[in-house]
Image (cartoon, grey):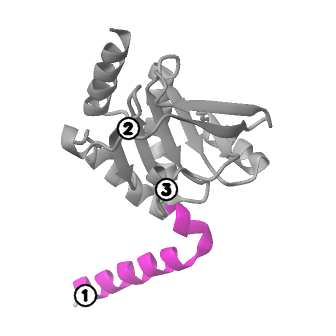
Amino acid sequence: MKKIKLKNIIYIILIALFIIPQTRTPIQVAINKLKVYLFSPSAFAKADQTQLPPFTYQLRTIDGFAHTAEIGQGKVTFISYWATWCPPCIAELPSIEKLYKDYGDKIDFVLITQEEPDKVKRFLERKELSIPAVFPQMETPELLYESTIPTNYIIDASGKIIIKEKGPADWNSAEVRETLDGLLSETAH
C-alpha cells in the first residue's frame, strides 16, 4: 500500500512541475538533453542529398551589421534555425558551441533566429555561448524551409545538403566531426 501512495505522490509532483511555468522549461530542456546525448545526426546517402542552387543568404548580425552567407559558393556551411524559448534548441546549443569553437574558422556557421536581437544577446550571455546568432533579412529559401525548430543543416561547398536534422541532436559527435573533416578535405583539393 505504501508503494502505491509513494508512486501517486511522485506522479502528482511531476505533474505539478510540468504545470508550474518556472519549472516547465528546465524540465523540457533536461529531457531534450537526454535526446542530444543519445542521438547524433548522420549524413544522407548520396542519392538523398538535395542540391541547392548557389545563393547569398542576406542576414543581420546581433550588433545590427549586414552579413551574408554564400551558400554553395565554395565553403562548407552549418545552418541552424532556432529560438531562445525552444527547449530542444537550448538542449543542443552546447554541442553546437563546441563544434563552433573547433570549426568556426573553417566552416560558415549561420544560426538563424527571428527574435529580438537584445533578447538573443542576453540569452547568449546568460548561457555563456559565443555562437554567431544572425537574423534573416530575406525569406527562407524554399528548399530549407521547415516549420520545426530546431532544424539544422550541414551543406557542402557546392550546395548539397549533406545532413538535415529536425529536433535536438549531438552536433559535437565523432560522426559529425568525421563528416565535416571529409567535406573540408574535399574543399581543400
Residue at image coords 49%, 34% = 54
Residue with the mark numbered 1: 4
In the image, which is nearer the foreground, mark 1 or mark 3?
Answer: 3
Task: Name the main secondary structure of what is drawn in magenta.
Answer: helix
For numbered disc 3, what is the local secondary structure? Answer: loop
Instruction: Name the outermost residue toward the bottom.
Output: 1
**Tag 2: Cα neighbours inside 10 Å, few (<14), some, or many (≥20)?**
many
For residue 145, the mark is 3
Instruction: Name the outermost residue toward the top.
Output: 189
* Mark 1 to mark 3 CA distance (whole Å): 48 Å
In the image, which is nearer the foreground, mark 2 or mark 3?
Answer: 3
Amino acid type, callout 3: Tyr
Hey, which quadrant is residue 61 in on the image?
top right
* Mark 2 to mark 1 CA distance (whole Å): 41 Å
Q: Relative to 32, is 182 above or below?
A: above
Residue with the mark numbered 2: 171
Residue 80 left/right relative to 10:
right
Which is more N-terminal, label 1 or label 2?
1
Residue 171 image offset from top left, x and y in percent: 38, 38
Part of the protein shown in magenta? 2-26
Amino acid type, callout 1: Ile
